[in-house]
Amino acid sequence: MPKKNTPLGERRSKVPERQLKTLERVLSKAGLGSRTDARSWIAEGRVRVNGRSVLDPDHWVDLDRDRVTFDGKPLRAAAKIYILLYKPKGYLTTYRDPEGRPTVYDLTSGVGTWLSPVGRLDLDTSGLLVMTNDTDFAERLTNPDHHVPKTYQLKASTVLGDEQIEQLRRGLELSDGPTRPALVKRLRDHPKYTHLEMTITEGRNRQVRRMVEALGSKVLKLVRTAIGPIRIGDLPIGKWRELTKAEVRSLGG
Ligand code: URA
């Protein structure tokens, strides 16, 4: 058995400036495919490090020194790309769906490189989704400590009173803990429904829906209209555009 390479501790502390990454990560960063794809290519023996086939996806690679090839071709870091997609409802934010439903990848195949969504939108939610091949940026943005505000417009299934709206503003108790305070604006009332704009700084699973359900109501329609300062503008539904450098910087990139 070849000796497992040791990235942490001794090796890392002696050479702190070296860029060590797992083989799986190096592959997915090169923009060729998802991390799941990367793992299976490695298991199939299609990836070599310094000429030797490596079957362990967690093998540590030093990007400055090791030569990684995929199907015999040297791997190059892909140019970083950041896009903004206006996801329609009915599209999944996943790569593959066992039920064959449409996914955000059906809408972004023209980009020409592998991208990961930054966070998720539910199947029934439409609106803005950032996708990128910059995994460090995506991880920073989805880190719970990184409070990028996200704005939603929603239609609630009941008329919500001022006190209920105050509860959303103060933050309320969900099954996974209390929510941070939200910015909430009443947009318009209908005899049966309330339309709200709500800005939250967390990205918990189905958070907006669960917050409204905690008031005894339901979300009938949900659209994410802004991520930080970036708004939908005139982007048509189902289409994407590249983020400008200033927009990437505004999200901490
Ligand atoms: N909150 C939700 O409930 N759903 C989303 O898709 C996004 C935020």
Image (cartoon, rainbow, N blue to C red):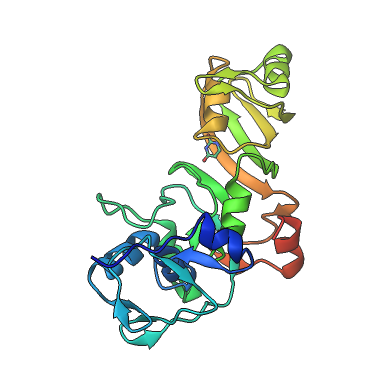
The residue that appears at 46% across and 42% down in the rendered structure is 122
**Count of marks overlaid on the render:** 0
Which quarter of the figure is the C terminus placed in?
bottom right
**Quick check: 153 above or below 1?**
above
**Quick check: 48 above or below 186?**
below
Which quarter of the figure is the N terminus placed in?
bottom left
Question: Of 165 and 64, which appears nearest the observer?
Answer: 64
**Quick check: 210 above or below 104?**
above
Question: Of 164 and 6, which appears nearest the observer?
Answer: 6
The residue that appears at 41% across and 48% down in the rendered structure is 90
The residue that appears at 22% across and 70% down in the rendered structure is 44
Which of the 4 image quarters holds residue 153? top right
The residue that appears at 50% across and 46% down in the rendered structure is 120
Q: In the shown orientation, is residue 69 left or right of residue 224?
A: left
Question: Of 223 and 93, which appears nearest the observer?
Answer: 93
Residue 237 x/y as whole percent: 55, 57
Residue 27 x/y as whole percent: 42, 70
Q: In the shown orientation, is residue 81 left or right of residue 35?
A: right
Which of the 4 image quarters holds residue 69? bottom left
**Quick check: 56 above or below 45?**
above
Q: In the shown orientation, is residue 9 left or right of residue 45?
A: right
